[in-house]
Image (cartoon, rainbow, N blue to C red):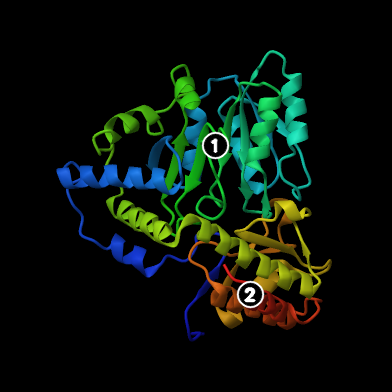
């Protein structure tokens, strides 16, 4: 059955790609070894550093965020090294599994997936590591599967209080360009990011922002690498080149995304995401539905994960909404499979889009027979109508 109107993509990534970026990506290709592309690459890297307020090295890979995870590990660590990971959701769990697959010793802090990284536990674990066997701490800033955001600033303070030299690696795949993140100020050694969420791009680009301590660690790292090796990329980037055929069209789109973020202003971008997240949570509260995230201080600005009442299926709800109104919501992942649906509110999203999204959810709750109170959309609209950026 054909449904009139556009498809509503309200998953927490990939997000909607703005027309400006699509047009930029349609530009004719040029010689990737020529002077025009070299100048473009240098301008692009400078734009990324300026937009995100960092002086760290920028490494771009044609890959999903998983590739940037791997690059962070193999460029800084050696077989048998210990890493401290916090299992706070599906993606932090997968990153820990990747580390284990490389022969790293993974010290895993378990959780119920409803809270973020606990700085107190972190300080205790590092304080107990008198011989500094732990070489890196792996943290997911914003856990896409649960809608829980950890405080990277508090993580760094805990590491400093323990006087521990471990590297701090932070996954910002669903937080970069959507909420405050200061890699230089917060002492992050390696940042992991992807193109398909707050950067408003299609999937296909991943990033490492690399600090001085990580560059130093790379000199003695012994995990095998070739494609993921930072050094050839950094060396050739100095002249605006890449050691492989670069994804030129994607890079065109990335530059347009940087321009759009700069034009809106990052503080305004952050405020917009926070405001739309608050509206979404207002609707969930009015519906009488519980969030996965238990602490208000850890609410995600980019994704809200909502639990359906016992005896109901979130997947049935999502399918009803998709079939009747052509809107896609995020599914529950891992231990939250089938009992959670996720609403993405990041990237190029505004008040009217989130109002339409919440209307679709409220209609879907009724159509699927999910117990709820009426008035979620009204609560969200009242909040949006009485607040401004």
The image quadrant that residue 79 belongs to is: top right
In the image, residue 357 lies at what x, y percent?
60, 75
Is residue 62 among what the camera can see?
no
In the image, residue 278 lies at what x, y percent?
67, 65
Work out whether 168 lies above or below 194.
above
| Residue closer to the observer: 331 or 264 | 264
Residue located 72% across and 45% down the image: 116
In the image, residue 44 lies at what x, y percent?
32, 47
Work out whether 266 lies above or below 159.
below
Locate the C terminus by quadrant: bottom right
* Left or right of 248 in this view: 77: right
Residue located 49% across and 28% down the image: 74
Give SS at disc 1: loop
Residue for badge 2: 384
Is residue 121 among what the camera can see?
yes
- Pointer 1: residues within 10 angstroms few (<14), some, or many (20+)? few
Residue for badge 1: 185
In the image, residue 213 lies at what x, y percent?
50, 24
- Pointer 2: residues within 10 angstroms few (<14), some, or many (20+)? some
Give SS at disc 2: helix
Residue located 63% across and 38% down the image: 139
| Farthest-out residue, right | 310
Q: CA distance from mark 1 to mark 2?
A: 32 Å
The image quadrant that residue 126 belongs to is: top right
* Left or right of 38 in this view: 251: right
* Left or right of 67 in this view: 339: right
* Left or right of 37 in this view: 77: right
Mark 1 and mark 2 lie on one chain; the one further toward the N terminus is: 1
Residue located 58% across and 81% down the image: 325
- Check contact, mark 1 vs mark 2: CB within 8 A: no
> Could you say which disc has been placed on residue 87 in the image?
none
Work out whether 187 lies above or below 43.
above
């Amino acid at each position: 059955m054909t449904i009139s109107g556009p498809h509503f993509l309200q998953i927490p990534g990939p997000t909607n790609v703005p027309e400006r970026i699509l047009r930029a990506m349609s530009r004719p290709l040029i010689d990737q070894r020529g002077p025009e592309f070299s100048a473009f690459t240098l301008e692009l890297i400078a734009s990324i550093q300026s937009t995100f307020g960092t002086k760290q090295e920028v490494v771009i890979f044609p890959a999903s965020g998983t590739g940037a995870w791997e690059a962070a590990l193999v460029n800084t660590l050696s077989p048998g090294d210990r890493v401290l990971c916090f299992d706070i959701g599906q993606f932090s769990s997968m990153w820990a599994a990747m580390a284990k697959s490389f022969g790293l010793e993974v010290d895993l802090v378990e959780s119920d997936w409803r809270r973020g990284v606990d700085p107190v536990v972190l300080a205790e674990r590092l304080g107990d590591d008198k011989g500094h066997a732990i070489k890196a701490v792996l943290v997911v800033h914003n856990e896409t599967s649960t809608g829980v955001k950890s405080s990277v600033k508090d993580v760094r303070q805990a590491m400093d209080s323990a006087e521990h030299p471990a590297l701090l690696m932070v996954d910002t795949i669903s937080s970069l360009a959507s909420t405050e993140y200061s890699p230089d100020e917060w002492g992050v050694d390696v940042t992991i990011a992807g193109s398909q969420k707050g950067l408003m791009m299609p999937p296909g680009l991943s990033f490492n922002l690399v600090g001085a301590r990580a560059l130093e660690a790379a000199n003695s790292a012994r995990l095998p690498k070739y494609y993921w090796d930072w050094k050839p990329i950094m060396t050739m980037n100095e002249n605006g080149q890449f050691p492989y055929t670069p994804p030129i069209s994607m890079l065109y789109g990335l530059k347009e995304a940087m321009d759009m973020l700069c034009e809106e202003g990052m503080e305004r971008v952050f405020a917009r995401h926070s405001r739309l997240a608050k509206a979404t949570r207002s609707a969930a509260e009015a519906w009488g539905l519980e969030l996965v995230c238990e602490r208000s201080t850890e609410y995600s600005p980019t994704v809200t994960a909502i639990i359906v009442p016992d005896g109901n299926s979130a997947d049935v709800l999502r399918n009803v909404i998709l079939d009747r109104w052509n809107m896609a919501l995020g599914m529950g992942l891992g231990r939250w499979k089938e009992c959670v649906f996720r609403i993405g509110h990041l990237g190029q999203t505004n008040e009217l889009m989130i109002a339409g999204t919440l209307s679709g959810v409220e209609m879907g709750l009724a159509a699927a027979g999910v117990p709820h109170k009426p008035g979620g959309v009204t609560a969200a609209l009242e909040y949006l109508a009485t607040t401004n950026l």
